[in-house]
């Protein structure tokens, strides 16, 4: 199609009558603004650099990386090293059970049955997933506290602690069991 097509007078009159009365806007009033500069995330870069530097340096010996863990238990007479090894994942978890959505009564029975079955099968390191209790409607972590009480009372539990962060953290418990004689 040509750029400037010839418009006949009849079409021009029809167009003017269809759009009505118009006035021309002055073109000097349009001032163009320069685009704003792109943002410079300097603080984010500095924060990221500091995190990278901190990750290169190990924690001092006097700081325990797992000091904030809420669940820890070691049977009297056992070496603290066992608890540290459990926390570092040096025992192979052979079985796990998830208690999410269970009532407290059902969870109590399931925990006892699970531990008995694990010992019978010689699976002496197990994981119990309780969840963190975020959906307990103000009652706190019901299943987590229930599991803590049950595990402390059982004679066949040698040690337990909250799982490592990538294994469930505060929502899971790694348990070391005693072999039946």
Image (cartoon, grey):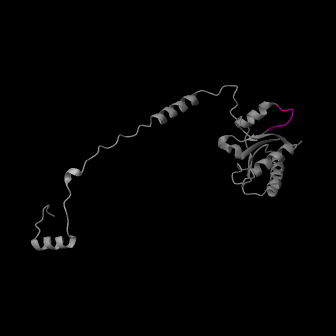
Q: Which residue is rendered at x = 76% and y = 45% of the image? A: 126
77 inside magenta stretch? yes
Q: Residue furthest right?
A: 181
Q: Which residues are magenta?
A: 73-78
Q: Residue furthest top?
A: 61
Counting labels gives 0
Is 92 positioned to the left or the right of 178 in the image?
left
Q: Which residue is rendered at x = 68% and y = 43% of the image? A: 169
117 inside magenta stretch? no
Q: Quadrant of residue 153?
A: top right
Query: Do we see residue 81 in this rendering?
Result: yes
Q: Which residue is rendered at x = 87% and y = 32% of the image? A: 77
Q: Nearer the viewer, residue 117 or 58?
A: 58
Q: Quadrant of residue 22?
A: bottom left
Query: Do we see residue 90 in this rendering?
Result: no
The quadrant of the image that shows the N terminus is: bottom left
Where in the figure is residue 40, as x and y percent of width and height? Answer: 41, 37
Where in the figure is residue 13, as x and y percent of width and height? Answer: 14, 72
The quadrant of the image that shows the C terminus is: top right
Where in the figure is residue 136, as x and y percent of width and height? Answer: 72, 54
Query: Taking 106 as reference, is 91 above or below it?
Result: above
Q: Nearer the viewer, residue 22 or 142?
A: 22
Where in the figure is residue 79, as x and y percent of width and height? Answer: 81, 30
Q: Main secondary structure of the magenta part?
A: loop
Q: Nearer the viewer, residue 128 or 39?
A: 39
């Amino acid at each position: 199609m040509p750029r400037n097509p010839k418009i006949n007078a009849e079409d021009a009159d029809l167009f003017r009558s269809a759009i009505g009365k118009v006035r021309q806007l002055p073109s000097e009033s349009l001032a163009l603004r320069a685009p704003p500069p792109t943002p410079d995330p300097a603080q984010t870069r500095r924060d990221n650099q500091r995190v990278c530097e901190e990750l290169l340096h190990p924690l001092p010996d006097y700081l325990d990386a797992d000091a904030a863990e809420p669940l820890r238990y070691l049977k009297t007479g056992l070496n603290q090293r066992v608890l540290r090894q459990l926390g570092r994942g040096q025992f192979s978890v052979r079985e796990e059970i998830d208690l999410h959505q269970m009532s407290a009564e059902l969870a109590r029975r399931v925990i006892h049955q699970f531990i008995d079955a694990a010992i019978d099968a010689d699976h002496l390191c197990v994981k119990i997933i309780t969840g963190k209790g975020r959906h307990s409607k103000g009652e706190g972590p019901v299943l987590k506290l229930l599991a803590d009480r049950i595990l402390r009372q059982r004679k066949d539990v040698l040690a337990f602690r909250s799982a490592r962060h990538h294994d469930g953290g505060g929502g899971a418990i790694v348990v070391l069991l005693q072999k039946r004689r």
